[in-house]
Amino acid sequence: MAILSGTDIMVFMKKGASATLTSIGYATNHTLTIGSNSSEVSTKDDAQGIWQSAVVQKLNWSATTENMYSIDQAGNGFDDLFDAMISREPVDIKFGLETTAAAGNKGSVPTTGWTGASTPMFTGKAYVTDLSWNNPNGDNSSFTATFTGTGALVRA
């Protein structure tokens, strides 16, 4: 059984006009959430009216990234996410393995950030909808970003 290590899973985003999707630097945690909106279709005829029946109307997805804040950010950093958020334009993101982990290698982060492997990977367009810069007294500065998908999330 091959079990993925959470260490190797990253969120990748395009920065500016670049065609390359690079990691959001110094990540500590990522979460991909896939959900649905449903409508109740219960009637009095369904199990004497005591059990709810539903149908799925729409699917939705979001991703979050938690990262250490660094001035010499490798890959995308807080400022890049801030720019993406205030532009109010969707960005291309990928969620999955980075290239060297997919190849079975480990190493130092490239100065431009990690790049995503072709599989396993989920891709889509999303808006940066929440951005928090966390600065606790006596602890490391960090940031959290939430991406809200617009359109389909595609599994590579």
Image (cartoon, rainbow, N blue to C red):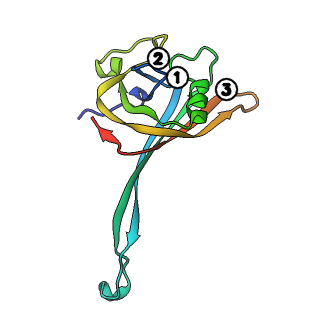
**Residue 18 x/y as whole percent:** 44, 19
Mark 3 neighbour density, 10 Å: few (under 14) some (14–19) many (20 or more): few
Quarter of image, res 13: top left
Is residue 40 shown to the viewer in this render?
yes
Q: Quadrant of the C terminus?
A: top left
- Cα distance between the residues tagged 1 and 2: 7 Å
Q: Residue at x 47, y 17 (%)?
A: 113
Tell me if residue 41 comes above or below residue 110 in the rendering.
Answer: below
Q: Residue at x 39, y 20 (%)?
A: 19
- Circles 1, 2 touching at the beta carbon (< 8 Å): yes
- The residue that label 1 is drawn on is 76
Disc 3 marks a residue whose amino acid type is Asn
Residue 61: give its label: none
From the viewer's side, name the closer residue of 151 and 146.
Answer: 151
Tell me if residue 87 comes above or below residue 46 in the rendering.
Answer: above
Is residue 144 shown to the viewer in this render?
no
- Cα distance between the residues tagged 3 and 1: 18 Å
Q: Residue at x 62, y 19 (%)?
A: 70
- The residue that label 3 is drawn on is 140
Secondary structure beneath dot 3 equals loop
Tell me if residue 129 comes above or below residue 105 in the rendering.
Answer: below
Disc 2 marks a residue whose amino acid type is Gly
Position of 1 with respect to 77 (left or right) is left
Disc 1 marks a residue whose amino acid type is Asn
**Residue 135 x/y as whole percent:** 71, 31
**Residue 8 x/y as whole percent:** 39, 26
- Which numbered mark, 2 or 3, is in the foreground of this view? 2
- The residue that label 2 is drawn on is 113
From the viewer's side, name the closer residue of 114 and 103.
Answer: 114
- Which numbered mark, 3 or 1, is in the foreground of this view? 1
